[in-house]
Image (tube, grey):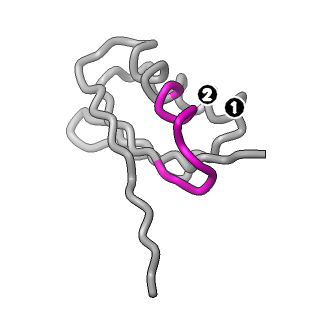
């Protein structure tokens, strides 16, 4: 038997900083350890914002990429 965890998706395209990271932070508060969040953003400031958010909150930034001006971040929820 397999247990597949759904990945939460936040589409924050065309929203200016700090809105994407604030939306991510709100979503992460409701998530359990091991769950993943995918965030899409178009504001280049989101790159630094998300990295700093993960560093200070303890969540794991497991992937970050950019394609055609859309930044995609995959964050794994860490709980102590």
Q: Position of residue 47 (x, y in %)?
A: 47, 29
Question: What is the x, y in percent for residue 55?
Answer: 69, 33
Q: Are marks 1 and 2 in contact (CB under 8 Å)?
A: yes
Residue 53, image quadrant? top right
> How many tags in the picture?
2
Region of the chain picked out in magenta, as a range = 25-36
Question: Relative to residue 11, is residue 75 depicted above or below?
Answer: below
Binning the other alpha carbons within 10 Å of mark 2 as few (below 14), some (14 to 19) or many (20 upward) gives some
Q: Is residue 69 above or below residue 22?
A: below
**Which sits in the foreground, 27 or 16?**
27
Q: Is label 2 in a helix, a strand or a loop?
A: helix
Answer above or below: position of 17 versus 34: above
- Whether 11 is among the magenta residues is no
Does 49 sit left or right of 7 as displayed? right
Q: Which residue is mark 2?
A: 53
Q: Residue at x 39, y 53 (%)?
A: 7
- CA neighbours of label 1 inside 10 A, class few (<14), some (14 to 19), many (20+): few
The residue closer to the viewer here, 38 or 7, is 7
Q: Which mark is residue 37?
A: none
Q: From the top left corner, tell me how far across and down residue 17 is, in percent.
A: 41, 13
Residue at mark 1 = 57
Q: Residue at x 58, y 32 (%)?
A: 51
Q: Residue furthest right?
A: 80
Q: Residue at x 58, y 48 (%)?
A: 32
Instruction: Say what secondary structure mark 1 lies in.
Output: helix
Q: Along the horizontal axis of the image, is 9 left or right of 3?
A: left
Q: Quadrant of residue 72?
A: top left
Q: What residue is drawn where x is 53% and y is 43%?
A: 31
Instruction: Calculate the distance from the C-alpha at mark 1 to the C-alpha at mark 2.
Output: 6 Å
């Amino acid at each position: 038997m397999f247990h597949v965890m759904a990945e939460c998706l936040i589409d924050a395209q065309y929203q200016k900083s700090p809105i994407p990271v604030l939306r991510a932070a709100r979503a992460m508060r409701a998530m359990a350890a091991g769950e993943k969040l995918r965030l899409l953003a178009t504001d280049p400031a989101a790159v630094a914002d998300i990295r700093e958010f993960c560093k200070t909150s303890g969540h794991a930034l497991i992937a970050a990429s950019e394609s055609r001006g859309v930044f995609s971040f995959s964050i794994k929820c860490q709980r102590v």
